[in-house]
Image (cartoon, rainbow, N blue to C red):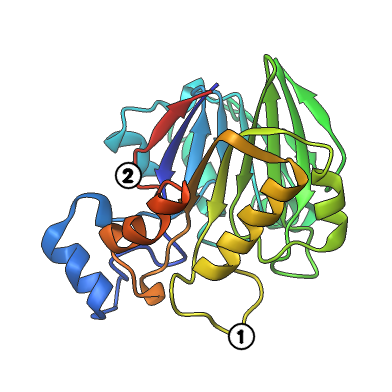
Amino acid sequence: MVITLLGTGGADGIPGLFSSDRVSEYAREHGGKDIRTRSAAVIDDVLKIDFGPDTWAQCHRFGIHPDEWQAVLLTHDDEDHLAVPEFQYALYPFVNRDHLPFTVYGNGHCLKKITDRFPDWPLDLVLTQSFHTFDFCDYRITPVAANHAPPQDAQNYLIERDGKTILYATDTGVWAERTWRFLEGVRVDLMVLECTEGIVPTPYNGHLDIEECLAVVSRLRHQGTVRDKTVIVTTHHAHMGDCTHGELEAKLHPLGIEVGYDGWNREV
């Protein structure tokens, strides 16, 4: 499998649209990896993870054609991950087509937002539930429960194909014990893990700062989910975390964790 991180920013990206903090101003001046659009990814150009407000720009930047997607996997219904109005551009009158070219998988909150906006449209929507595995084409996909945005069933995704496993874990918070217990029986070849709050912890428990991110990785190593050869890469960085890309690398690279950036990709 080949995974590409199309976006690695938090809710308002980096630089923050209306922010003039140090990290945002640095990104405006230096560009490159410090420019982060809202978090999203694609696997094998077949599975799209999340459908946020930067989808159009990401596709054009990285030469991706959405008609190649066969499924869109939604993690939760926050607007930086689910921009419902964008679905209309896949259908008539914007194109000569009366159905989506892909299946949309998501929790009940996600699907309700979509059907509320498009109640009469022929959309192929499938409800997902944490810890309930389903098969799609050659992929075996298991949503796992995140600790984020209750009461909805916010989900991270285990994606398996040809003996390889990717864990895509954005907006995780520190997992509840049921998720830890489930992951004890899993071996991961590549993990994408949020590090939203950087070096500025907040009282909100639905995101990770660097210390929490390291604690999650340590526990996963201890229980064998993550091994020496597992690729670990971060995503969902917020400018309010007060770290530039280079500063994140200085903190995380020595610990065997790569810092994700828009366009990062890897084959497993």
> In this image, 167 relative to 15: left or right?
right
Q: Is residue 118 above or below residue 47?
A: below
| Mark seen at residue 203 | 1
Q: Name the residue nearer the viewer: 69 or 195.
A: 195
Residue drawn at x 44%, y 28% as measured from the top left: 266
User: Where's residue 255, x and y in %?
Assistant: 46, 52
| Residue located farthest toward the bottom when viewing the structure as drawn | 203
**Left or right placement of residue 74 versus residue 97 in this view:** right
Q: Choose top left, top right, bottom left or bottom right for residue 268.
A: top right
Q: Residue at x 51, y 22 (%)?
A: 44
As helix, strand or loop, the secondary structure at mark 2 comes to helix
Q: Residue furthest left?
A: 29
Nearest to the eye among marks 1 and 2: give it: 1
Question: How many tags in the picture?
Answer: 2
Give the residue displayed 83% in from the left and 48% down from the top.
Answer: 130
Q: Secondary structure at mark 1?
A: loop
Depth check, front residue: 249 or 254: 254
Separation (CA) of disc 1 from disc 2? 33 Å
Percent x, y of residue 85: 52, 52
Assess disc 2: are there few (<14), some (14-19) or many (≥20) residues with their C-alpha within 10 Å of its C-alpha: few
- Looking at the image, residue 91 sits to the left or right of residue 20; the answer is right
- Which quadrant is the N terminus positioned in? top right
Q: Amino acid at mark 2?
A: Ala
- Report the amino acid beneath label 1: Pro
Q: Position of residue 200 (x, y in %)?
A: 45, 79
Asked if residue 96 can be seen in this view, the reply is: no
For residue 194, say whether it is visible.
yes
